[in-house]
Image (cartoon, rainbow, N blue to C red):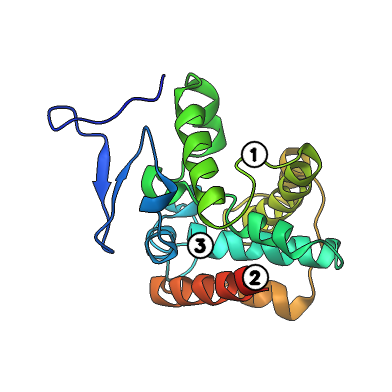
Amino acid sequence: MTARKSTETTRAWQRMLSGRRLDLLDPSPLDIEIVDIAHGLARVARWNGQTSGAHIFSVAQHTLLVEAVMRQQMPRVDIRHRLAALLHDAPEYVIGDMISPFKAVLSGEYKAVEKRLLGAIHIRFGLPAVLADEITQQIKAADRGAAYLEATHLAGFSQAEAKRLFGRDPELLEATERDYLTPWTAARAEKQFLERFKALHAS
């Protein structure tokens, strides 16, 4: 899929609650607001909603968990890398969360849209459009650790199955694990995502 400007006859943009109009195929950093990202991610369910608890386990809460895993695994990691970890799934505020097995059967078009959105988001918040491979691998490792915890605590996977698919248990502190793996309301997920973003972005 090649980037193209949306038209009124073929709409490829979404109106945001902030008033911004984001072109999904040719996104501009100027049309990206953190309040829209936080609001959207807090209402997108991980695991297609197949998790235990009174609320969905949102992508917003997942990204906070990923950043917590990275923070524990690499206490001295650059704060900008932690910001990138928090934003690693940010495109899902407009394209939703698609489970990995389904992504695997699609063509590269989904990934191309996702990549362009993430690049625009990075530029908007002062990060490189494309991260260095080392940073990307650090984020992926933390993401897999978070997925292991979510799979075993919320999505019904056995430890052996989760280890085979996602790797080892990152072994968070018990209190941290208990809090981050109790699904929050959308309002709490949105609020905590925004607070963590502000703390990382302001540093």
Q: CA distance from mark 3 to mark 2?
A: 15 Å
As measured in the structure, the alpha-carbon distance from the residue carrying label 2 to the one carrying label 1 is 19 Å
Q: Which residue is mark 3?
A: 60
| Percent coordinates x, y for residue 16 in the rendering | 27, 56
- Mark 1, other Cα within 10 Å: few <14 / some 14–19 / many ≥20: some
Residue at screen point 61% across, 65% down:
64
User: Could you tell whether 99 is left or right of 5 in the image?
Assistant: right
User: What amino acid type is highlighted by mark number 3?
Assistant: Ala
Judge left or right: residue 118 versus residue 167: left
Q: Is residue 89 visible?
A: no
Query: What percent of the width, then of the height, locates residue 104?
Result: 55, 25
The residue pinned by badge 1 equals: 130
Residue at 80% across, 56% down: 169
Foreground residue among 150 and 186: 186
Furthest residue in direction bottom, as rendered:
175
Instruction: Point out the image quarter for the C terminus.
Output: bottom right
> Which residue is depicted at the point 26% across and 62% down?
17
Viewed as shown, does residue 23 lie left or right of 170? left
Q: Are marks 3 and 2 in contact (CB under 8 Å)?
A: no
User: Around disc 2, counting alpha carbons within 10 Å, would you say few (fewer than 14), some (14 to 19), or many (20 or more)?
Assistant: some
Which of the 4 quarters of the picture holds residue 180?
Answer: bottom right
Q: Residue farthest to the left?
A: 9
Q: Which residue is mark 2?
A: 200
Q: Position of residue 173 (x, y in %)?
A: 80, 75
Please state which of the two labelled residues, at mark 1 or mark 3, is closer to the viewer.
1
Image quadrant assignment for residue 185:
bottom left
The answer to the question of whether label 2 and label 1 lie on touching residues, with beta carbons closer than 8 A, is no
Identity of the amino acid at label 2? Leu
Circle 2: element type: helix
Nearest to the eye among marks 3 and 2: give it.
2
Near mark 3 (Cα within 10 A), the count class, few <14, some 14-19 or many ≥20, is many
